[in-house]
Amino acid sequence: DVQLVESGGGLVQPGGSLRLSCTASGFNFGTYWMNWVRQAPGQGLEWVAKIKQDGSERYYGDSVRGRFTISRDNAENSLYLQMNSLRVEDTAVYYCARDSSGYYYLFDYWGQGALVSVSS
Amino acid sequence: DIQLTQSPSSLSASVGDRVTITCRASQDISSFLAWFQQKPGTAPKLLIYAASTLSGGVPSRFSGSGSAAEFTLTISSLQPEDFATYYCQQFSRYPPTFGQGTKVDIK
């Protein structure tokens, strides 16, 4: 079965940094585009970032571009999100999500999420 | 960015009811629309993609229709496990965007 497990969430002060990880299993991780999607408390869903299979292409949402960096290690079946210059409005549950094999930006499997709280 | 507007934002229904949720896009997205179900404290689950294709393991009481800029999710006979929030999402153009959600609760 496909599994995605996030870790690394926590409480951080505004301006601080945090690194999220997502460990994948049950599929050939290195052959899929991967994404981060977030959900602020009680709010809807917002796509954050996307990375190609070999890491050669990366895309970001406007609200995080220049502050967040998506990366991956295919040997470790792991996806990462380095978050710098965090703001209160970055508080959210962060999900890693797999692109389907047939469509870009169609998220067919999601992890359980990691909560990031930005507060002083 | 493409805006998706869902209606209603919430609804109350009884077990056995037929439920319909609409998603309107700010521009033509062909059939590049998905529907997700989310229960409290859990990740979204893909129900339908390409406007009308049921994802694996999803019960046949769920169906999707529409194209271009207007789409519908229908639950033919609401079951207790269907009380949740439903989101539409377009994957036609970058960046991918979601509707604001429709909460389905017990009447």
Image: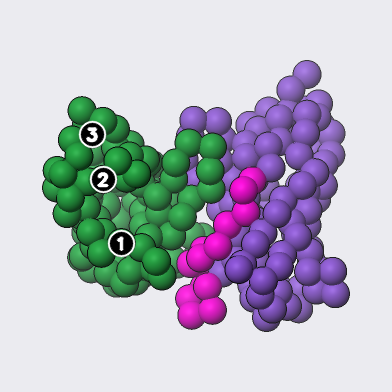
| Chain the render paints purple | A
Hey, what amino acid is under mark 2? Gln
The residue depicted at 44 percent of the width and 66 percent of the height is B91
Judged from the image, the secondary structure of the residue bearing numbered disc 2 is: loop
For residue B59, the mark is 1
Tell which tag, 3 or 2, sits nearer the viewer. Answer: 2
Q: Quadrant of the N terminus of chain B?
A: bottom left
Picture coordinates of residue A62, whole percent (x, y) = 60, 50
The residue depicted at 54 percent of the width and 79 percent of the height is A101
Q: Does residue B31 appear to the left or right of A74 in the view shown?
A: left
Hey, what amino acid is under mark 1? Pro
| Chain the render paints green | B
Label count reads 3
Residue at which label 3 appears: B11
Picture coordinates of residue B41, whole percent (x, y) = 54, 37
First in sequence: mark 1 or mark 2? 1
- Which quadrant of the view contains residue A52? bottom right
Residue segment shown in magenta: A100-113
